[in-house]
Amino acid sequence: MKNTIKKMLSVAACSFIFSGSLMGQEIQMNFDDTFNPTHENRFSFMLGVNPSLTKSGDMSNFTFSYARKMENFWLDSNVMMTKGMFNKFSANNPTATGATDAQLEEQENSLTTIGIGVGRETRYAQTLLPFNDIYELMAANLTYNMYKEDFSGKSFSGPGILAKFSVYKKFNDYFSAGTHFNYNLAVVKRSKEIDTETNSQRSLTLGFLTIGFDLSFYL
């Protein structure tokens, strides 16, 4: 449990430190009208899958994101709905699930994630890719996660971290499209079944990466 909490804090710290370390270089870029949208609201729709080409169908999710521009940052909020095989979400904790690895191996479960955090847009990818109007988004969210393990019917919930990275092509002032990478890390636990149960006996650590397409609209 302690190692997982440290990992969550590290993911959040790296996201904010990296974003902050770029601030001085981005001030000049933020005055470029072709980069910074004049609209203050961004609506994003993301479809993601497991990054393994041979097992992409083992996990899929849909994310709706709303962001509000706050000077050089975006206030970022997300609702993510994920379905996938148990072993793509987590390693089994038999005392928490009440099931064996073999029983859960082919089990499909669902996860709902709600998050809020901050994001920052840059356009460093434009220096590497032969396209105009390319920019990227980095964001970190604190999340609340609700996980349903369907084999046993047990429900788990708890806090986590969502780290997002997207690369977009801007088509006009209202529309951008691109690809995204989402990493979700969470510690969820079920309710006590007996009074002597410890947190570790009823907890699961969830950690997974999805990649996919991102459509964003500015209003």
Image: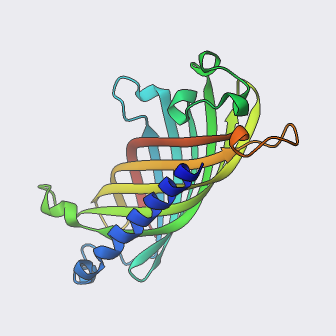
Q: Position of residue 154 (x, y in %)?
A: 76, 33
**Does residue 36 appear in the picture of this structure?**
no
Residue ranking furthest to the right: 195
Q: Position of residue 52 (x, y in %)?
A: 36, 30
Residue 152 against residue 9 in the figure, above or below:
above
Q: Residue at x 68, y 27 (%)?
A: 94
Q: Is residue 148 left or right of residue 215?
A: right
Q: Nearer the viewer, residue 189 or 157?
A: 189
Q: Nearer the viewer, residue 93 or 137?
A: 93
The answer to which image quadrant residue 53 occupies is top left
The answer to which image quadrant residue 24 occupies is bottom left
Q: Residue at x 45, y 56 (%)?
A: 163
Q: Count numbered badges in the picture.
A: 0
Q: Position of residue 136 (x, y in %)?
A: 30, 61
Residue 207 against residue 159 in the figure, above or below:
above
Q: Position of residue 202 (x, y in %)?
A: 73, 39
The answer to which image quadrant residue 171 occupies is bottom left
Q: Is residue 65 left or right of residue 102?
A: left
**Does residue 30 appear in the picture of this structure?**
yes
Q: Residue at x 52, y 67 (%)?
A: 117
Residue 64 against residue 133 in the figure, above or below:
above
